[in-house]
Structure formats: structure tokens, C-alpha cells
Image: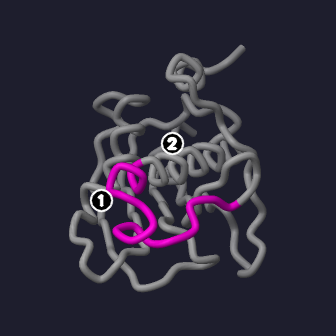
């Protein structure tokens, strides 16, 4: 039986992607510490392939950057499911951090990350409201437009 959160995803026409193994760095996709789950930065993938390669403000509009942020957030959710087995075990979304590969003149960095934040809030309601940091950068791994990471309070 699907979790409540996964049912909401289905109702939204979205599905969880497969968790990707880190290819370059010797890192973990997630790490539990006490009642916190730390999810490493996740780049957007569509059908298992790295997607959204390019800069927001050059190859991609703000709206497309928000879609890329949502796709990265789906990868974060896939990691949560991999770590916990059930997305409903998330009690609170504590913090989200997004790194956007932007053209130097692009300044809507915070608005771009809304694609991830709005998905988490829609799925988790008040528990999905979180602190966050949005950072514009000159380059990203694989040339992707965005990477999203998060800290989550979980049911033990």
C-alpha cells in the first residue's frame, strides 16, 4: 500500500525516480543521526538520466529552473524513501538548500528554489515548511542547473 505522501505524488501526476548512486565522490546519498536524516545534494534526473544541463537565465527561464528544482526535490524524496522505506516517516522538513547554476545576471535565485519548496509544502503541509538557503553558483557538477539537499526530522 502506498504511503499518503506517495498517493499525493500520484494525484499530482508525479512519481518517485530511482535513487542514483553517487558516481564521482565517495559520499553517501543520506546519513541518519539520531532523529535527523541528512540527504546529500541531488541533481535532477529524468528516466534515470541527468537532466537540466545548462544555466538558469541563459538556457533556462525562471519557470524552467523551478521545474528543475522540483525534479531535484523528487530525487531527494527518492533518497528519503530509500533510507526510511516510507515517506510518511518524515515528521518535519527542517532545512532545504539549493545551489543554482546561473548566468551572472540572473537574480531570481530564491524564486527558482520555490519549485522544490512548494512541492515539499504541498506534500507535507505545515510539516513541510522549512528554513532554506538558495545560492547562485558559477558552475555545477555535470553542468546541471540545480542541486537540492535537505535535513529532515524523522519518526524513529
On the image, the x and y values in percent for residue 57 come to 34, 68
Is 118 or 108 nearer to us in this picture? 108
What's drawn in magenta, residue-wise? 50-66
Asked whether, in this view, residue 83 is left or right of residue 8, the answer is right
Splitting the image into 4 quarters, where does residue 17 fall? Answer: top right
How many numbered markers are drawn? 2
Q: Residues within 10 Å of mark 2 (few under 14, many from 20)?
A: some
Task: Indicate which disc, 1 or 2, sits on the residue closer to the N terminus.
Answer: 1
Secondary structure under the numbered disc 2 in the rendered image: strand
Q: Which mark is residue 67?
A: none
Image quarter for residue 110? Answer: bottom left
**18 relative to 3 in the view: left or right:** right
Residue 42 visible to an observer of this rendering: no
Residue 111 locus on image (x, y percent):
25, 55
Going 58% across and 62% down the picture, which residue do you hit? 43
* In the image, residue 119 above or below residue 132: above
Residue matched to label 2:
154
Numbered disc 1: secondary structure:
strand
Question: Is residue 127 among the parts visible in the rendering?
Answer: yes
| Whole-percent x, y for residue 2 in the image | 67, 18
Q: Nearer the viewer, residue 37 or 96?
A: 96
Q: Nearer the viewer, residue 156 or 39?
A: 39
Mark 1 crowdedness (10 Å alpha carbons): few <14, some 14-19, many ≥20: some
**Distance from Cα at disc 1 to Cα at disc 2:** 18 Å
Q: Is residue 2 left or right of residue 119?
A: right
Most common SS among magenta residues: loop
Q: Quadrant of residue 9?
A: top right
- Image quarter where the N terminus lies is top right
**Residue corresponding to mark 1:** 132
Amino acid at each position: 500500500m502506498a504511503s499518503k505522501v506517495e498517493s499525493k505524488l500520484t494525484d499530482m501526476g508525479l512519481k518517485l525516480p530511482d535513487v542514483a548512486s553517487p558516481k564521482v565522490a565517495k559520499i553517501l546519498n543520506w546519513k541518519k543521526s539520531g532523529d535527523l536524516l541528512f540527504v546529500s545534494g541531488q541533481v535532477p534526473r529524468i528516466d534515470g538520466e541527468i537532466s537540466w544541463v545548462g544555466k538558469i537565465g541563459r538556457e533556462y527561464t525562471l519557470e524552467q529552473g523551478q521545474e528543475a528544482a522540483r525534479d531535484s526535490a523528487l530525487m531527494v524524496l527518492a533518497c528519503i524513501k530509500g533510507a526510511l522505506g516510507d515517506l510518511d516517516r518524515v515528521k518535519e522538513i527542517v532545512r532545504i538548500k539549493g545551489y543554482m547554476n546561473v548566468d551572472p545576471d540572473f537574480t531570481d535565485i530564491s524564486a527558482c528554489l520555490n519549485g522544490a519548496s512548494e512541492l515539499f509544502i504541498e506534500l507535507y503541509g505545515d510539516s513541510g515548511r522549512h528554513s532554506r538557503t538558495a545560492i547562485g553558483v558559477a558552475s555545477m557538477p555535470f553542468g546541471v542547473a540545480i542541486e537540492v539537499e535537505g535535513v529532515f526530522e524523522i519518526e524513529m
